Image (spheres, rainbow, N blue to C red):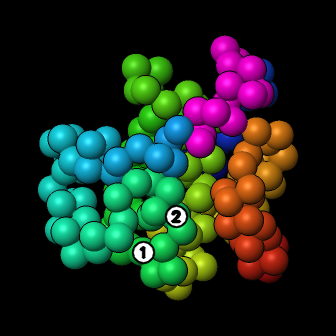
Amino acid sequence: MARAFAPPEAGGLWAQHELGAMLKHQLLVDLWWELGQDRVLGPLVREPLMRCPAIVTFGDLLAHPHPPIELLEAVKVYAKGSARDADRPLPAPIATVLYYLVIIAAQRRCGRRITGLTEAELAAGVEWALAQEWLGEGPRKLLQQALPAARH
């Protein structure tokens, strides 16, 4: 599983400051606009978004004290697909960070595990994400919460 979803290689098409701006932008994107029109993800996000009107954007989802697990799982599927598919709008590093963020949000805020990664694989991914210069303060805080739990 880890080989199937390994953190992207350093470098790539984007400069560090561009990746930071892209992550900030992605956290402001409306979840319904991004996922609601997808034939697979749309039906999964409709009801949780209606049930929890405080969650509008990706950032709202990640900051929510108890986000709907269905939304976290849908964003995980979206991020995983984006990281693997060159035709998706998200660059692989952004998609990968988003992937780890929703996994950690599910563990820390919902008490649920939504990944098949081992604890060691998850810790390696979180450490990779934390090493990214462009990671903003909010995402960094959420990921830092994972390290003690991921190392056990």
140 to the left or right of 30? right
Rendered image quadrant of residue 15: top right
Task: Classify 17 as above or below 48.
Answer: above
Residue ID at (75%, 28%): 17
26 to the left or right of 54? right
Give x and y (percent) for residue 35: 28, 46
Part of the protein shown in magenta: 12-24
Q: Earlier in the sequence, mark 2 or mark 1?
A: 2
The answer to whether residue 2 is seen in the rendering is yes
Give x and y (percent) for residue 43: 15, 56
Q: Which mark is residue 67?
A: 1
Q: Secondary structure at mark 1?
A: loop
* Quadrant (top left/top right/bottom left/bottom right) for the C terminus: bottom right
Decide whether the magenta segment is chiefly helix, strand or loop. Answer: helix
Q: CA distance from mark 2 to mark 1?
A: 7 Å
131 or 120: nearer the viewer: 131
Q: Which mark is residue 62?
A: 2
How crowded pointer 2 is (Cα within 10 Å; few <14, some 14-19, many 20+) is rated as: many
59 or 126: nearer the viewer: 59
Q: Amino acid at mark 1?
A: Pro
Task: Classify 58 as above or below 10.
Answer: below
Give x and y (percent) for residue 97: 62, 47
Residue ID at (28%, 70%): 53
- Mark 2 vs 1: CB contact within 8 A: yes
How crowded pointer 1 is (Cα within 10 Å; few <14, some 14-19, many 20+) is rated as: many
Q: Amino acid at mark 2?
A: Leu
Residue ID at (45%, 64%): 61
